[in-house]
Amino acid sequence: MKYKRILLKLSGEALMGDRQYGIDPKRLAEYAHEIKQITNENVQVAIVIGGGNIFRGVAGASKGMDRVQADHMGMLATVINGLALQSALEDAEIPTRLQSAVKINEVAEPFIRRRAMRHLEKGRVVIFGGGTGNPYFTTDSAAVLRAIEINADVILKGTRVDGIYTSDPEKNADATKFDFISFDDVLRKGLKVMDTTAFTLSQENELPIVVFDMNKAGNLLKVVSGEAIGTQVNL
């Protein structure tokens, strides 16, 4: 395996499958199968999931809700998604721990860096819920922050497209895919990989990002194995 310890970033929308909202158990089972393929290769896996399939703080604020209140609701949505993924992983016989930046001790451990790293060393998948625990920060920022804290080798951003393109490939058939691209080129071209705060934090800490299609069977294992899947962003 090319990577020993990874941070997998999934969007909340990815958990909807073909639904309009909520969580699709079939999609969860598919993801659990993909993750088990790499844990079987002794890859240490941490995961951050968004909450957009349930509630998105920015959207709530745009409709008149207090932004801080809306972001707290979004954090709780990520914990719900984390619980759902934890259940699917444990159904696949993968030992899993859910840690939350927001204290919900009845359903999740509090985030403690050393404990998280110990879980990873013991072969447990660690899901980080609750974002950063602070409003005004996205789950992209949470993913980069946690990846740096646990000394991950890479951030794997699982999406529904197979990499980074010159423009949205779902809207522009002429969009061109990048196999490799630098942090500076992403910023210069104005490409949307992560929000600016998260992306800059990743760049400053020299943490590479791979954007790939998580919904294609076998892709996660291929990426971790070092195959040229998706788009790699590095220095």
Image (spheres, rainbow, N blue to C red):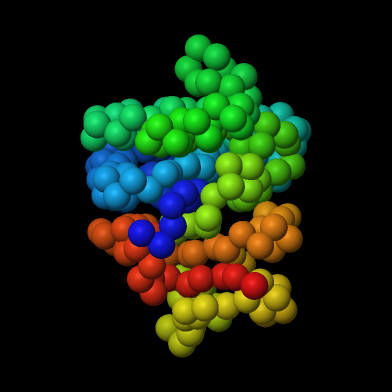
Front residue of 230 and 121? 121
For the N terminus, the quadrant is bottom left
Examine the rendered structure and indicate whether residue 179 appears above or below residue 66.
below
Rendered residue at 25%/59% (across/down): 217
Q: Quadrant of residue 139?
A: top right
Point out the image quarter for the C terminus. Answer: bottom right
- Residue 29 rendering spot, x and y as whole percentages: 26, 41
Kindly indicate the quadrant of the structure image that contains residue 193.
bottom right
- Residue 128 location (% of width, % of height): 53, 35
Residue positioned 50% across, 21% down in the render = 108
Q: Is residue 154 above or below residue 23?
A: below
Is residue 100 visible from the viewing direction of this image? no
At 57% from the left and 70% from the top, the residue drawn is 233
Question: Can you give x and y, in whole percent of width and height, for residue 141 in the image?
Answer: 66, 48
Which percent across, then down, holds residue 4? 43, 52
The residue shown at (68%, 31%) is 133
